Amino acid sequence: MVYEIWVFAEQQDGKVRKITFELLSAGMEFSKKTARPLSAILLGKGLEEAVKSLTPFADKIYLLDDPVFNPYTSDAYLTAIIALVKEHQPSILLGGATSTGKDLFPRLAMALQAGYAPDCTGLTTGEDGSLVAIRPLYGGKVFSEVVFSNASPQLATVRSNTFIVTGTPDKSAQVITVTPQVDPSSLKKKVLGVEKAAGAKLDITEAERVVAAGRGIKGAENFKILEELADALNASVGTTRAVVDAGWREVKDQIGKSGKNISAKLYMAFGISGAIHHVLGIGTCKTVVAVDTDPNALIFNYADYGIVGDLFQIIPALTEELKKALKNA
Amino acid sequence: MEIYVLVKQVPDPEAIVKVKSDAELEIENKYFTNFFDEIAIEAGLKLKEKFGGKVTVLTVDNRKVDALRRGISMGVDEAFQITDPGLEGSDLFGIARALAVFFKAKPFDLILAGRQAMDDDAGIVGPAVAEILRIPHINSIIGLEVDDEKKEAKVVREVENGKEILTCPLPALFTCQKGLATPRIPLVMNVMKAMKAQIKKMDLPALGLSGSDVGARAARVKVRKYFPPPKRPPVKMMKEDFPENVKTLVRLLREEAKVI
């Protein structure tokens, strides 16, 4: 038995999500170190484009192209993936810590009696193929190094932007078409519809750049200037609990303990005082910029760059300055 | 409706948590009922108000039962604590086994839980319990309508930058996200009553579980080491007047941080 390293390839409308390429890029390193093949498992309907984009990133693609897999439901995916894992016995199975990953992986781990490290911010492997996962605990106040028992496979989901997508993928995957043994009448959950937020912005958990404002922005209508900055930067817009509780923005945009943890490469906070609830959600962001009128605001303790100033003055100026800088790039 | 809510007492977000040694944490004694679990309790109580029946809260914890008392003060009917020295060292799948076996001989319509606990932020126990019980689960719901006669639920689930609307038959397990319900503030009188209320205890033999199902021996993952979060270098403040400070910031983001 060759114990392969597997990545659950997440796709939406036939397009593979960026997190999958991030995981496959990390998987290439693991594959080199352990001399084990790297495989992607891809489920959905109408996957030609997805297969093409995955081909340079994996040694094999297990392809399950069937209407039963579109849209995602855990029922159909579980049945198919459990059967596939039992047949091929991969040593590692990785997925994104996305809404799908968080829905699928705990159940998959339970069914397979496998170990599972959720929502990791780091992942390494020994030469023997044993995974070591880094996980923040208590909202990032401490970190843990998680190891697995000998049970196989080892499962982990990883936050977006933890790994960088390699620019030079050089594999050429063999496509293995698998006929799914899923009876559509056995599926209990039915998806009636999906409502997408207006605009094509990435979710704040996936975006490489996030700009956010707190109560300092003084009202829902003022988010317009932040949206303009976001457009200039190709960033997504986040916010704080106080703003969501005031009804100015939706819960899905909330960063922090009762909201989302983000791992953006660039995070900019405007008019955010830096309550612990909020800063716990930005601990794994790479570069943090804070702008606030109060020079003693706690947010400056968690930032790399700071400006003491009025966001109503700073944001529009920053938008213009960034537009110029990015145009000359 | 027979509704069960899985709850956990966790450190308050304000509580200080520090690394004491590789193997041990120092956690300030400042606990509260997991934020998302309170939302689940509220959602359960709302369904009971509409359809009648019973709401029961359930926790696996050898020490802390305040989450159960919180549930009682909010108005649930019954509270169970699963407690046994054999549970020490369990991973979350062990906890899920202990919870699932509780339901073996019980008819139920709905199990609710928080979308994740604010200590380990794992989100494992809910879906894992559903897997053992072979019932559907839906994660991170922000809307819930139940048709008690048809034994069917229509839920809204949060997904990246949008919402998904699903139906599924009951019994089922749903994990609850902020926005689903606003937890009621219990009356002082009910808080007092809850302090004295009886908590029913169950141990592993009562559940028919052995040490090989739960505890350290059954665990598939363990923490090898705790460590403090990486520290950020001290903040660089842009000292110039506006608009020079904005120009400097953009230059540093480009040349130093290399993020634009």
Image (cartoon, grey):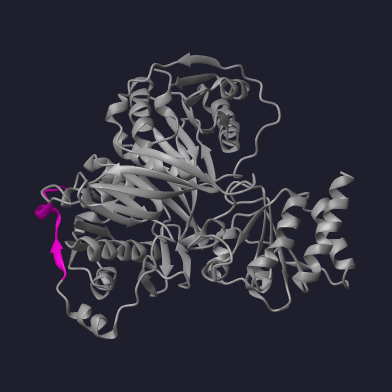
Taking the image as shown, residue A236 lies to the left or right of residue A86, namely: right
In the image, residue A152 above or below residue B256 = above
Question: Residue B145 versus residue B257: which sits nearer the camera?
Answer: B145
Residue at the spot 48% in from the left edge and 73% down from the top edge: B14
Q: Nearer the viewer, residue B225 or A192?
A: A192
Vertical placement of B164 versus A248: above or below? above
Residue at 87% in and 61% down? B247
Q: Quadrant of the C terminus of chain A?
A: top right
Residue B11 position, x and y percent, is 40, 68
Whether residue B203 appears in magenta in the rendering, the answer is yes
Residue A194 in the image, given as x and y percentages of width and height: 48, 42
Q: Residue B178 lies in magenta, yes or no?
A: no
* Quadrant showing the N terminus of chain A: top left
Q: Position of residue B209 (x, y in %)?
A: 15, 48
Which residue: 73% across, 67% down?
B235
Res A211 quadrant in image: bottom right
Residue B82 visible? The answer is no
Magenta-drawn segment? B199-210
Tally of marks: 0
On the image, the x and y values in percent for residue A133 come to 48, 44
Q: Look at the picture and state if A274 lies above or below B163.
A: below
Question: Which image quadrant for residue A153?
Answer: top left
- Residue A39 vs B19, above or below: the answer is above
Q: Residue at x 40, y 53 (%)?
A: B141
Q: Is residue B86 visible?
A: yes
